Image: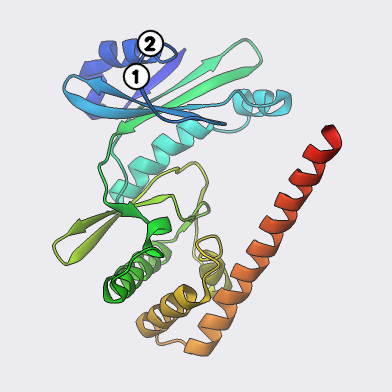
Amino acid sequence: MKIVYADAFKDQAGKIDQILADFSEKGKTLSSGRNIIKTFDLNGRQVNVKSFRIPNLINKIIYRFFRKSKAARSFSYAEYLLSREVGTPFPVAYAEECKWITFGRSYYICDHLEYDFTFRDIEKFEDEAQKESVLRAFTRFTYELHEKNIEFLDHSPGNTLIQIDGDQFEFFLVDLNRMNFKRLDFKQRMKNFARLTPNKEIIKIMANEYAIITAWNENEVFETMWGYTQEFQEKFLRKKRLKKKLKFWKK
């Protein structure tokens, strides 16, 4: 197994290796499904270990020779985000199981981060003033990503962890393996909000804040942001209906 350690954790390589060896039998499961996330103790420090599922046959070859694995990308993107002062759990290490010409599982290890809520929870807030405050803060955070030429392709409701710090909010990106680093034009910036929510009122608040920051036309910002949101939701629902039909025909 190939293991790459962050500089700050090279002296704990033996313990990290043991955590990986024990992954299937030990650790507290936080999430299971296509990928599995468990938490472990690393010399008194709580870390998360994400095990990415074994890729299909084609991707086994691609990840072996032509493209960085999801774990490797998560690790390098985390280091880059921190270098640009963007919040994300501190990267510890990543590991890859490789055979002669194929690729197996990969693992990404990072700090375990305690948080108060995610974007998904904002809609449930009963305090409308607090809801609007965090939405505007989140929009400013997203704007700062865009200004730093960071396109977070999985900018979805569960992938930003939010901490409350007095009357301020701190944001931390997770699930990092899909990102682009480039100058973003108007449409690309607006499309980056598409996965977050189908709630029109929330989109209105975020569009208003983005327009205030940029001095762009608010109506154009909202119409474009809302248009991409509807487009994404339509594709999402079509995919959901298709999966339902396939399950029916398999019975």
> Which amino acid type corresponds to the residue marked 1 in the rendered image?
Gly
Residue in view at x 46 percent, y 79 percent? 207
Residue in view at x 65 percent, y 17 percent? 102
**CA separation, marks 2 and 1?**
8 Å
**In which quarter of the view is residue 185 placed?**
bottom right
Mark 2 vs 1, N-terminal side: 2
**In which quarter of the view is residue 232 placed?**
bottom right
Name the residue furthest right: 249
Q: Number of numbered discs present?
A: 2
> Which amino acid type corresponds to the residue marked 2 in the rendered image?
Asp
Where is residue 78 shown, x and y percent of the image?
36, 42
Choose mark 2 or mark 1, whichever is in front.
1
Left-right relation of 160 to 69:
left
Where is residue 172 shown, x and y percent of the image?
32, 51
> Closest to the observer: 124 or 18?
124
In this rendering, is residue 176 above or below 184? Answer: above
In this rendering, is residue 200 above or below 170? Answer: below
- Specify few, some or many for label 1: CA neighbours under 10 Å numbering under 14, 14-19, or 20 or more: some
SS assignment at label 2: loop
Where is residue 53 shown, x and y percent of the image?
57, 26
Residue in view at x 29 percent, y 48 percent? 83
Which residue corresponds to mark 1? 27
SS assignment at label 1: loop
- Specify few, some or many for label 2: CA neighbours under 10 Å numbering under 14, 14-19, or 20 or more: few
Answer yes or no: do the residues labelled 2 and 1 have beta carbons within 8 Å? yes
> Closest to the observer: 68 or 251?
251
> In what quadrant of the picture does the C terminus appear?
top right
Left-right relation of 243 to 60:
right
Where is residue 57 shown, x and y percent of the image?
72, 23
Q: Which mark is residue 140?
A: none
Residue in view at x 57 percent, y 75 percent? 226
Which residue corresponds to mark 2? 22
